[in-house]
Image: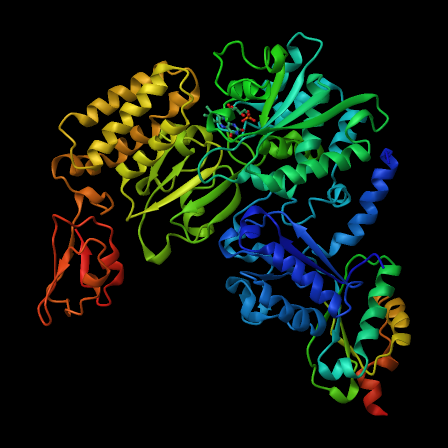
Amino acid sequence: MDIFRSHILICRGTGCTSSGSDQVADAFDKYIKEEGLEQEVKVVRTGCFGLCEVGPIVIVYPEGAFYSRVEEKDVQEIVKEHLVKGRVVKRLLYQESLDKDRIKSLNEVEFYKKQMRVALRNCGVIDPENIDEYIAMDGYKALTKVLTEMTREQVIEEVKKSGLRGRGGAGFPTGTKWEFVYNAPGDKKYVCCNADEGDPGAFMDRSVLEGDPHSVLEAMAIAGYAVGADQGYIYVRAEYPIAVRRLQIAIEQARNYGLLGENILGTGFNFDIDLKIGAGAFVCGEETALLNSMEGKRGTPRPRPPFPANKGLWGKPTLLNNVETYANICQIINKGGDWFASIGTERSKGTKIFALGGKINNTGLVEIPMGTTVREVIYDIGGGCPNGKAFKAVQTGGPSGGCIPAELIDTPIEYDTLVKIGSMMGSGGMIVMDEDNCMVDIAKFFLQFTCDESCGKCTPCREGTKRMLELLEKITEGKGEEGDIEKLQTLAMNIKDSALCALGQTAPNPILSTIRYFRDEYEAHIKDKRCPAGVCAALLNYIILEDKCKACGICAKNCPTNSISGKPKTPYVINQDTCIKCGVCMDKCPFGAIIKK
Amino acid sequence: MKKTIQELEEIRKKTLDKINIRKEREGTRIVVGMATCGIAAGARPVLKAFVEEVSKRGLQDVIISQTGCIGVCEYEPVVEVYKPGEEKVTYVRMKPEKVARIVAEHIVNGRVVNEYTIGSVNKR
Ligand SMILES: Cc1cc2nc3c(=O)[nH]c(=O)nc-3n(C[C@H](O)[C@H](O)[C@H](O)COP(=O)(O)O)c2cc1C
């Protein structure tokens, strides 16, 4: 029997897999077999549903029951109750999806309500290891269309019309880039995909590759046709083993069906794709460093111009686009550039995927129309900061970007608006900070990252990031001096102007934007030797409140440096000279009598 | 095996039928009572027969699901049919042999099979 009465969709993205969805899926197979339901119920392993916070996620159709945090031990109950007897297991449902006794459809749940899935359309819907399911969702229809009905120029025109801009960070108009490569003279050209994704906390591209690998393959073939290339490469980091495996399977299946390789669909068009596995250096996401790395050289940037469109891989004209950029292409071809351009705002078209992380209730993956405000993402979709803490700022653009402070929360998310307020769209990482985050410490975190990841080729970046980091360390250790802020600013401007690639040119951004919006915090560290958020260890002391201390001695017993002393019935005291500020005493105190100040 | 454009289209159609269930839809719902009493009275073969009949006919907008005890154990196996905008129809003392007729007359052609419904069984 081909048709199943029920489908069980289990997320096998990296997030849910790391919380055990693999074992959950196997358990479903086992118990379904035990109940003799294997002819009626189909188990499908899918890509990411987005709500990683409550994974592993399991959705059972036709009811559309959305189970969250499903563990192996819960599976038997779901099979026996839901699949055999038709009784939804309410205790395992994602709470918000239950409205009295009715199961809400996914689109009614707050987390999904404001989202619009274009690039992620198939993630969590199809089995990414089954090309037929991709084909069913109009897969390879766009490729058929361009090969049989459109000229190369028409394809480029359609992409231009859509207004699509690169999703990898810089936001360059995609159609224009395709045109450059189309116009570049040369008998051999390449189409490459940037799947390096090195921003801390970002996992948009990984989710697309894991959940819908064919959408990228098909788009690359379309790009190959448009620009005149017969070979494609995907540069993907080795730290993404699931994505790599699904890509390998997808390429194999596409070749078998004749959708990659020679004479595709009998049209005479040849195009094949191979993988290049990267070792995971952040700088290798930069386009020229990526090309060097693909050629087997050290992953360091080259000066531009010449741009890759003219002189790219092995000196040949090369088109390089980001994973998410490609993931939009088939939809643009199928539904038309005008359709795509109708989503979003004047200068930012379509949707953008963001990886929500940090101090936010609904950690996960969201895709929203451009122009959605930061407030809608943080509160309506993200559910606000945990434990009722106040939202302070959100970092977009990762280590190259900047922060958006709470007072600018109504800013619409578009390329140009974000740049104007000192941040950037970036590739889609969104790290949320609450009142407990110190902004100087945040800047230090990102500088630590760029300093580690600087390739060392050019002096401004190699030395400059280090000097900036030293200044930040000095400030957070309470050794800051009058004039340090200005020194940071001067250094930052110099590095921006002189570094070889965008890694160095953008490295000062986190510092500049935190100074712009939170200068008072820098000043408190420097002048008052105080960390207002209570983060920088050197600037705070743990103190026992006399009126709350019950002299139980638990703090003293747990102190690793024996810095707490006291006697029965009198409040304990901390010796500030030997205290290492580990905070154990505060965690252990049963009466909340220890605070940091 | 290399595919032609025609073959791709066939794969698309065939697979779409199989995965259509994953969409949120407004279609006919056939609900089989599958509590202990229903199962004891033979609800499983009835459920299977519905699945077979619906897939044999390639019906798109029909969902087959189950529910717990409907409360009329005496009449089990019980099957309820919900069509959008119409009153619920309850079929009782179901047998696999009755399924084909319900699907053909009621689900496809919209004519309730009165003699299998709870109303007429009650009267007897
Ligand atoms: C340090 C650095 C890291 C980058 N990392 C990535 C990355 O991981 N993925 C990506 O697509 N683009 C990355 N970029 C941007 C690429 O250089 C390039 O602009 C992009 O891949 C072009 O594709 P698009 O036009 O589709 O966005 C990075 C740039 C820099 C300077």
Q: How is the image coloured?
A: rainbow
Q: Farthest residue toward the bottom?
A: B124
| Residue A34 as seen in the image, left or right of residue B121 | left
Q: Percent x, y for residue A320? A: 59, 22
| Residue A197 as seen in the image, left or right of residue B32 | left
Q: Percent x, y for residue A593? A: 18, 63
Residue A357 visible to an observer of this rendering: yes
Residue at 69% x, 85% y: name it: B71
| Quarter placement of the N terminus of chain A | bottom right
Q: Percent x, y for residue A231? A: 71, 21
Q: Which of A372 and A549 is in front in this view?
A: A549
Give the vertical position of A152 relative to B39 (above or below): above
Residue at 36% x, 20% y: name it: A461
Give the vertical position of A243 relative to A114 (above or below): above
Residue A154 visible to an observer of this rendering: no
Give the vertical position of A553 relative to A315 (above or below): below
| Residue A555 as seen in the image, left or right of residue A312 | left
Residue at 18% x, 26% y: name it: A484
Task: Identify the image quadrant of residue A297.
Answer: top right
Residue at 23% x, 58% y: name it: A586
Q: Which of A281 and A597 is in front in this view?
A: A281
Q: How many marks?
A: 0
Q: Percent x, y for residue A328? A: 62, 34
Q: Farthest residue toward the left?
A: A570
Task: Identify the image quadrant of residue A201.
Answer: top left
